[in-house]
Image: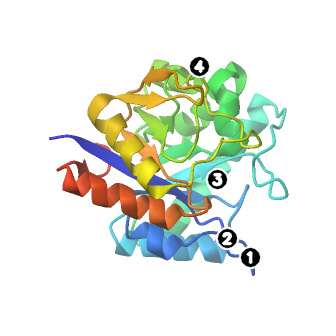
């Protein structure tokens, strides 16, 4: 029987500013990539998100990023490897503390935004992130883009790597993500997205933005919590996969 993990970026509200519907998404996903306060999320929000995830038996992942609240972590920062390693350790530790008092713990790490995209090709930053995870807890799996330098460095360092695909993002013919500011970069139609995920799980392929068929094998699929129609898309994915007998569960 086929199976897939469904993850989402959550805990990204800040103070009086609410982003996404974490309560609804936590009832649909199996893994929650919770912000760590650097790109989004304040301590009270992160604690509430971790508590809700623990109550629903949703796996908690540390979504680490650049120190960039103003840019929501979507701007590249030319940070030194030493500083990046320290920043990532700091973020994992902070979220792990909140998760533990909620009755859970951080069980994987996923970089966010510009950091996620940078370490597809930026080996120095990829190594810095890997070094941080190894220093904190070398048993933590990492989520990343298939073929990325990040997963390559993580595997070489002995970390468990989890290849990830995106339900709501367009791909280039080179199997990287189309930049958000490019027309067509974001997908919003729940039916289209659901069938896209089904095809990924069953046929191990995705279509690039130009129609190129990309061979893709992934253990986890992301639906961004801040994407318009996120709840509707996650609902449609769960409904279609359930009807096809495909199990939605955390990656092993």
| Label 1 sits on residue | 17
Label 2: few (<14), some (14–19) or many (≥20) C-alpha neighbours in 10 Å: many
Q: Where does residue 10 sit, x and y in percent of width and height?
A: 56, 62
What is the C-alpha distance between the residues marked 1 and 3? 21 Å
Query: Marks 1 and 4: in contact by CB < 8 Å?
Result: no
> Residue at the location (34% across, 28% down)?
204
Q: Secondary structure at mark 3?
A: helix
In primary-sequence order, the first of circles 4 and 3 is 3
| Relative depth, front residue between 35 and 97 | 35
Q: Disc 2 vs disc 1: Cβ atoms closer than 8 Å? A: yes
Q: Position of residue 79 (x, y in %)?
A: 82, 34
**In the displayed structure image, the side of residue 152 where residue 217 appears, left or right:** left
Q: Which mark is residue 174?
A: 4
> Which residue has dot 2 on it?
13
Spatial distance from mark 4 to mark 2, Cα to Cα? 33 Å
> In this rendering, does residue 78 appear at all?
yes
Q: CA distance from mark 4 to mark 3?
A: 31 Å
Residue 69 lies, in percent from the top left, at 80, 58
Q: Nearer the viewer, mark 4 or mark 1?
A: 4
Which residue is denoted by mark 3 in the rendering? 91
Position of the N terminus by quadrant? top left
Q: Residue furthest left?
A: 1
């Amino acid at each position: 029987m086929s199976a897939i993990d469904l993850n989402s970026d959550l805990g990204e509200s800040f103070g009086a500013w609410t982003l996404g519907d974490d309560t609804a998404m936590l009832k649909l996903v199996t893994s929650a990539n919770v912000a760590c306060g650097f790109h989004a999320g304040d301590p009270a929000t992160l604690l509430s998100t971790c508590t809700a995830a623990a109550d629903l038996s949703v796996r908690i992942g540390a979504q680490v990023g650049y120190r960039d609240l103003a840019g929501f972590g979507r701007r590249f920062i030319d940070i030194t490897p030493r500083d990046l390693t320290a920043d990532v350790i700091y973020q994992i530790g902070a979220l792990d503390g909140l998760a533990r008092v909620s009755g859970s713990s951080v069980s994987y790490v996923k970089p966010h935004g510009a950091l996620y995209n940078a370490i597809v090709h930026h080996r120095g930053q990829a190594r810095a992130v890997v070094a941080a995870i190894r220093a904190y807890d070398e048993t933590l799996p990492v989520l990343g883009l298939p073929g990325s330098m990040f997963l390559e460095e993580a595997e070489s360092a002995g970390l468990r790597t989890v290849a990830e695909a995106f339900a709501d993002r367009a791909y280039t013919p080179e199997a990287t993500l189309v930049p958000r500011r490019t027309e067509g970069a974001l997908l919003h139609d729940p039916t289209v997205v659901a069938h896209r995920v089904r095809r990924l799980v069953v046929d191990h392929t995705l279509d690039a933005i130009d129609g190129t068929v990309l061979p893709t094998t992934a253990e986890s699929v992301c639906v961004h919590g801040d994407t318009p129609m996120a709840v509707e898309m996650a609902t449609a994915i769960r409904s279609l996969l359930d009807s096809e007998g495909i199990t939605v569960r955390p990656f092993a």
